[in-house]
Amino acid sequence: MAIKKFVVGCFYDEQVLFPAVKQVRKAGYKIHDVYTPFPIHGLDAAMGLRDTSLHTAGFIYGITGTTVALSFITWVFTTDWPMNIGGKPFFALPAWIPITFELTVLFAAVGMVLTFCYLCQLAPFVKKDHFHLRATDDTFVMAIECTEKTNEAEAQQFLESVGAVEINTQYRETGWWMGRYDKETKFFSEKAEAIS
C-alpha cells in the first residue's frame, strides 16, 4: 500500500467551498478530491476534472452485444441447426431484432455498471479510507495531496485564508484494500510515524 500525505480542510458551507476550490487550484496545489454530502453542480469543472468516458464505454459494450447476438443467431439458424419455421427463410433478420435489442441493452448496462464500479473503486468487502467522518453528513472536505514542492504549513495557512474551518494533516492510503477500518487505522498511524 502506498501511504500518502494530505492536508485536509473542512468547510461547513458550499458557498465557501466552491470559490475555495478555484483558489486552491489557482495557487497550484494538487487537489486529491473534494468530498461533499450532496452533489454540487459545477464542482467537477471547478476542480478541472475532464468529462467522463462512460458513455463511450457504453456504446462499445452495446455494439459488442449487438455483434454477439447477430453472430450467434445467424450461426445457429443458418449453419448449426437450420429449421424451417412456417416457411421463413433461414436468415430471418426481422425476427431476430427483439433478441438483438435485449442483448445490446444487457451488455451495455452490465458493462457500464462494472466499469463504473472499477473506476470508482467500489466492490463488496473493499474498504476505502475516509478523511473525515462527517463528509457524508454535513461537512465538505477538501484533500490536498502533498508533493515534494508542497509546504505543509503554507498549505494549511492558505486553506484557512480561503475559509476552511478544520485543518489537519493526515496520512492515507488512496487505493482500495480488503480489511477492517479499526486495524487499518492503527497501521496508518504506525506508517505515519515511520515517515515523519
Image (tube, rainbow, N blue to C red):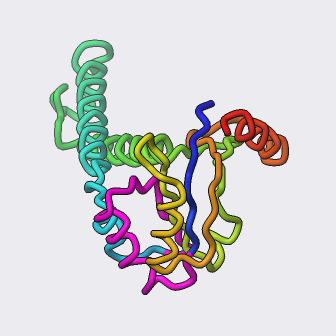
Magenta region, residue range:
11-38
Question: Which image quarter holds the N terminus?
Answer: top right
Q: Quadrant of residue 88?
A: top left
Q: Is 136 located above or below residue 108 in the figure?
A: below
Q: Is 166 located above or below residue 168 in the figure?
A: below
- Please give left or right for residue 152 compared with residue 19 in the image: right
Determine the residue positioned at 48% across, 61% down.
155
Determine the residue positioned at 50% across, 45% down.
117
Q: Is residue 95 magenta?
A: no
Q: Quadrant of residue 63?
A: top left
Q: Is residue 36 magenta?
A: yes
| Residue 114 percent across, percent down from the top left | 47, 42
Front-lying residue, 172 or 112: 172
| Residue 87 percent across, percent down from the top left | 19, 32
Determine the residue positioned at 39% across, 46% down.
112
Question: Which image quarter holds the C terminus?
Answer: top right
